[in-house]
């Protein structure tokens, strides 16, 4: 059982930056992809960014290069650097990980979420 704990959310002015962290309770070497989802108020949860074990990344088209996902396997932590924040980036951000158990079992884990509020 992998526990994911997000931190770094909060209130920021439009145009500002935040860095979210997702700390796993154990090694993330077997967790891929890992990523961030967000759920804006009144909307469905959507993918923001994902990163593979080798470091390949994938982002939602709407981000236009403003966010960067990274992972530090030694610290069992995934980060989301968010720059030039907009009002539409507000929502609850969830960390996600798929852990692979040999040979072919994939188990999904979610964090409890961290709130991001963007003021205009």
Image: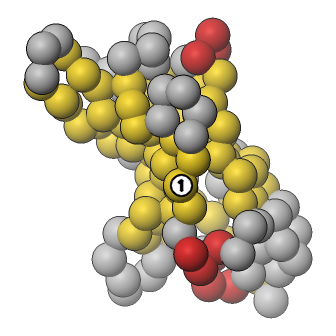
Q: Residue at x 39, y 43 (%)?
A: 96
Image quadrant in which the N terminus is located: top left
Is residue 13 found left or right of 51 in the rendered image?
right
- Report the number of discs: 1
Say how the picture is coloured: secondary structure
Q: For the point 32% across and 77% down, which residue is it?
A: 44
Residue 59 visible? The answer is yes
Viewer-nearest residue: 69 or 117: 69
Q: Is residue 7 above or below residue 14?
A: above
Q: Residue at x 54, y 27 (%)?
A: 54
On-image quarter of the C terminus: bottom right
Front position in the image: 39 or 72: 72
Q: Position of residue 2 (x, y in %)?
A: 32, 21
Question: How far across and down, in percent of the image, does residue 35 sit?
Answer: 47, 46
Residue bearing the label numbered 1: 58
Relative to 108, is 59 on the left or the right?
A: right
Task: Tell me the crowding category of disc 1: few under 14, some 14 to 19, or many 20 or more residues within 10 angstroms, Cα based.
Answer: some
Callout 1 secondary element: strand
The part of the image, by quadrant, that contains residue 106 is top left
Q: Is residue 56 above or below residue 120?
A: above
Task: Give percent across and percent down for residue 98.
Answer: 30, 34
| Viewer can see residue 118 | no
Q: Is residue 76 left or right of residue 16?
A: left
Q: Is 106 or 84 nearer to us in this picture?
A: 106
């Amino acid at each position: 059982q992998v526990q994911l704990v997000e931190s770094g959310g909060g209130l920021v002015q439009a145009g500002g930056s935040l860095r979210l962290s997702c700390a796993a309770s154990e090694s993330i070497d077997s967790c891929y992809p890992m990523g961030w989802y967000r759920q804006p108020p009144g909307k469905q949860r959507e993918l923001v960014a994902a990163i593979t074990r080798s470091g390949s990344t994938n982002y939602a088209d709407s981000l236009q290069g403003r966010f960067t996902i990274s992972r530090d396997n030694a610290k069992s932590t995934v980060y989301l650097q968010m720059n030039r924040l907009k009002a539409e980036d507000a929502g609850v951000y969830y960390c996600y990980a798929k852990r692979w158990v040999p040979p072919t079992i994939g188990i999904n884990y979610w964090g409890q979420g961290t709130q991001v509020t963007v003021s205009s």
